[in-house]
Amino acid sequence: MGGMAPGEKARHWHYPALPGVDLLRARYIDKTFLRHTHETFVIAAVTDGVEVFHHGGRDQYVAPGSLALINPDTPHTGRAQGPEGWRYGAVYPAVDVVSAIAAETTAIRGTPGFTAPVVEDPYTARLVHQVLRAADEGNALAADTLLRTAVTRLLGLSGGPLQPRRTRGAGARVAARARGVLEERMADPPTLERLAADLGTGSFALLRAFRDTYGLPPHAWLTDARVRRACRLLEAGTAPAEAAVAVGFTDQPHLNRHFTRIVGVPPGAYRRERAGTRSLSA
């Protein structure tokens, strides 16, 4: 349960020479990514098939030679357009990585971000795959150079100041307090009714304020947050079964199902890749 479907293959890994950057190479057929967010940027280049992801209120289509560009904390989904599935490679640079590149190579003021979710640019799509190849080969100079070149080019094509969500007033404050409670009680969260009562508001008012502020309803945000925390535990060497209980999933199959539908690989495979990285950097 929660594994890869027949014909699907994916690798999600770190390369120590690219700190603050996750790497992914994948071939998916039946995969459907839940609506979720990333703490990092997503730069994904499709090579075969067409990926469809819901972003900004509508479906976006990424064909071969195009890239999906997703800013941090931006809700989105992901699936294949057709039965043949899709193949792609992706880099997930942290905010400080992209900010450092932007400060050196662009005139963007403030935190940089992408203004368009899809860019057709075969040249940069090839650069993304060259980053992955260089990481596979252990070529640190090439991997770093190619990554910086790709990010700089994309910021030139579709870059601008990252726009925060425009949520103000009492609703935003209540949503922030609710998020704090859920982070603190991740393994034993209250019901929506109890949470709203404790915060002095109504259930539907809290639901609306939370979705407006974070782009997801509280229960979906909590699943997302649990998977993120599980990632950190797995990176530290925690066994998947222990990580599942620690973050509030009922058991390892429950973690497997949600983890694979958000991260793209099972938690065991994710942990094994990080174990290899730890041994290389030790």
Image: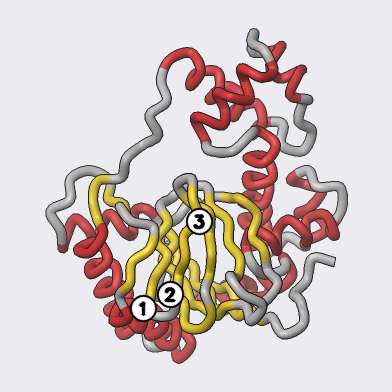
Determine the residue positioned at 76% across, 54% down.
Answer: 243
Which quadrant holds the C terminus? bottom right
- Residue 77, percent across and down? 58, 56
Q: Earlier in the sequence, mark 3 or mark 1?
A: 3
Indicate the quadrant where residue 271 lies. Answer: bottom right
Mark 2 or mark 3: whose residue is earlier in sequence: 2
Which of pointers 3 and 1 indicates the residue nearer the eye? 3
Left/right of residue 122 with respect to residue 8 in the rendered view: left
Amino acid type assigned to the residue bearing label 3 in the image: Asp
Q: Which residue in the structure is indicated by mark 3? A: 59
The kind of secondary structure element at disc 3 is strand
Q: Which residue is mark 2?
A: 45
Whichever of labels 1 and 2 marks the residue nearer the N terminus, that label is: 2
Tag 1 near tag 2, CB within 8 Å: yes
Answer whether residue 282 is visible to the viewer in this image.
Answer: no
Whole-percent x and y of residue 147? Answer: 32, 74
267 lies above or below 251: below
- Quarter of the picture holding the N terminus: bottom right
Amino acid at the residue labelled 1: Ala
Q: CA distance from mark 3 to mark 1?
A: 21 Å
Residue 252 x/y as whole percent: 84, 58
The residue sitting at 45% across, 69% down in the picture is 62
Q: Which residue is denoted by mark 1 in the rendering?
A: 125
Measured Cα–Cα span from mark 1 to mark 2 = 5 Å
Position in image of residue 175 (x %, y %): 55, 24
